[in-house]
């Protein structure tokens, strides 16, 4: 028994709709996970700051900062941690603020 064109069209539309809903739910879950991870990272940063625990710094980042090469320090920090450009710049600025001034 063959389907008439109307039934076939409805079946295709229902299938596309189901796939669309599944993909939308997957993207929403992914976005939600990223938001939750960012919140956990912020809280961990606050706890570390409160306890006075400094994040480990690669000697390469410090070496670049001591040589006045901030951009290279940010690149090295991003390579080390995988953070975004903004986060790496902020971290490098904090690190630079804790280094003794060279005369």
Image (cartoon, helix red, strand yellow):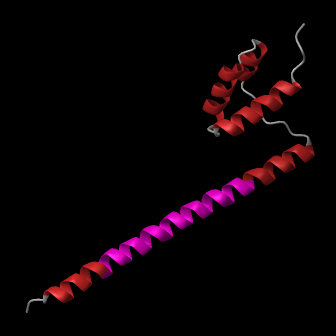
Residue 14 position (above or below residue 64): below
Whether residue 59 sits left or right of residue 34 in the image: it is right
Q: Residue furthest front?
A: 6
Give the quarter of the figure containing the C terminus: top right
Q: Out of 6 and 69, give the one closest to the viewer.
A: 6
Is residue 18 in sight in this rendering? Answer: yes
Whether residue 5 sits left or right of residue 92 in the image: it is left
Give the quarter of the figure containing the N terminus: bottom left
Q: Quadrant of residue 15?
A: bottom left
Q: Residue furthest bottom?
A: 1
Q: x, y percentage for residue 49? A: 88, 44
Q: Quadrant of residue 51?
A: top right
Q: Residue furthest top?
A: 103
Tell me which residue sits at (69%, 20%) in the image.
Answer: 60
Whether residue 67 sits left or right of residue 49 in the image: it is left
Q: x, y percentage for residue 96? A: 82, 25
Tell me which residue sits at (90%, 15%) in the image.
Answer: 101
Q: Quadrant of residue 85?
A: top right
* Magenta: main secondary structure: helix
Is residue 56 in sight in this rendering? Answer: no
Q: x, y percentage for residue 89? A: 72, 32
Residue 8 position (above or below residue 21): below
Q: Out of 9 and 76, give the one closest to the viewer.
A: 9
Magenta highlight on residue 98: no
Tell me which residue sits at (68%, 60%) in the image.
Answer: 36
Residue 23 position (above or below residue 96): below
Disc tally is: 0
Q: Which residues are magenta?
A: 14-40
Whether residue 22 sits left or right of residue 76 in the image: it is left
Residue 5 position (above or below residue 52): below
Q: Out of 80 and 92, give the one closest to the viewer.
A: 92
Q: x, y percentage for residue 87? A: 71, 39
């Amino acid at each position: 028994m063959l389907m008439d064109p109307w039934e076939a069209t409805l079946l295709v539309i229902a299938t596309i709709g189901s796939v669309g809903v599944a993909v939308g739910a997957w993207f929403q879950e992914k976005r939600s996970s990223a938001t939750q991870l960012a919140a956990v990272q912020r809280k961990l940063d606050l706890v570390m700051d409160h306890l006075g625990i400094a994040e480990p710094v690669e000697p390469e980042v410090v070496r670049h900062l001591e040589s006045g090469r901030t951009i290279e320090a940010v690149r090295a920090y991003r390579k080390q941690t995988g953070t975004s450009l903004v986060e790496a710049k902020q971290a490098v600025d904090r690190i630079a603020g804790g280094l003794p001034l060279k005369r």
